[in-house]
Image: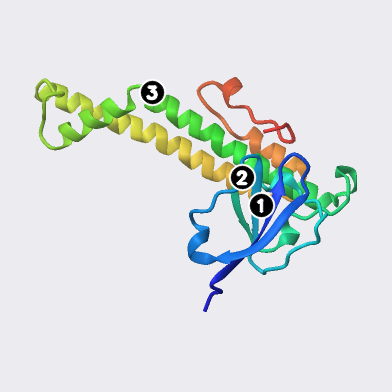
Amino acid sequence: MPSRNVRYVLVDIATGFVESRASVPRDMFDGMQPPEGKRLVVPADGVVPGERVKLDLRKVRKPINFVSSIADVQTAWRSDDEVPADLQFATTKGETIEALDRSYAERIEKVRGPLAALHAEKRRQAETGGGPLVADEADRLAVLANAAAEDERIAGIERQRRAVKAAVKAATTDDEIKAALASATGDDPKANLLTYGEPT
């Protein structure tokens, strides 16, 4: 049976140092928000570091971020240069995957266009036989044809996103990640470039 309480540490995002720690009832935690400018880190194993342990803020990206262990975000007093290479690689790879998803989401939104809600409603009406936004049978068939073409374009983008993301996840070296990103193609290659290691 899961614990009724949740252990957490409150991190100052400006310094990276633990500000406070506590245990709160689990049913209260869902609605709890950290004070402005703070991040909340929840170690599932209940292990809480000392008062002045610094956390790796690159891994604390959301206001409330569940982690399997406080060790997942802990860097103690080490500078970035002292962080193990495998941790640096894993962190940068994670940031690259997030940037990849954002890039493909932007591509999909461009396909849908600024009138996406209107087109969705026209499609709904066309699929149910017509409506005020569908002029006649020829218009209804055109709406359905356009919707099918849009679906296919989006499906192609999604297939590529999944393939590139899988390759990045499986990568064990910088060169493998760069090769995976280089395989990404789009209507405007310059707009879709993702360079591994750049800030996201």
Relative to 39, residue 102 above or below: above
**Which secondary structure, mark 1?**
helix
Q: Amino acid at mark 3?
A: Gly
What residue appears at the point 69 percent right and 31 percent down from the top-left corner?
Answer: 195
Look at mark 2 in the image and give the residue it sits on: 35
N-term-proximal mark, 3 vs 1: 3
Relative to 192, residue 61 above or below: below
Q: How far from the left and from the top, in percent, is residue 5?
A: 57, 69
Q: Who is closer to the viewer here, 8 or 119?
A: 8
The Cα–Cα distance between marks 1 and 2, rounded to whole angstroms, is: 37 Å
Look at mark 1 in the image and give the residue it sits on: 170
In the image: residue 153, left or right of residue 8: left
Q: Residues within 10 Å of mark 3 (few under 14, many from 20)?
A: few
Q: Who is closer to the viewer here, 78 or 29?
A: 29
Q: How far from the left and from the top, in percent, is residue 49?
A: 78, 62
Residue 80, picture quadrant? top right
The Cα–Cα distance between marks 3 and 1, rounded to whole angstroms, is: 33 Å
Tell which tag, 3 or 2, sits nearer the viewer.
Answer: 2
Q: Is residue 146 visible?
A: no
Tell which tag, 1 or 2, sits nearer the viewer.
Answer: 2
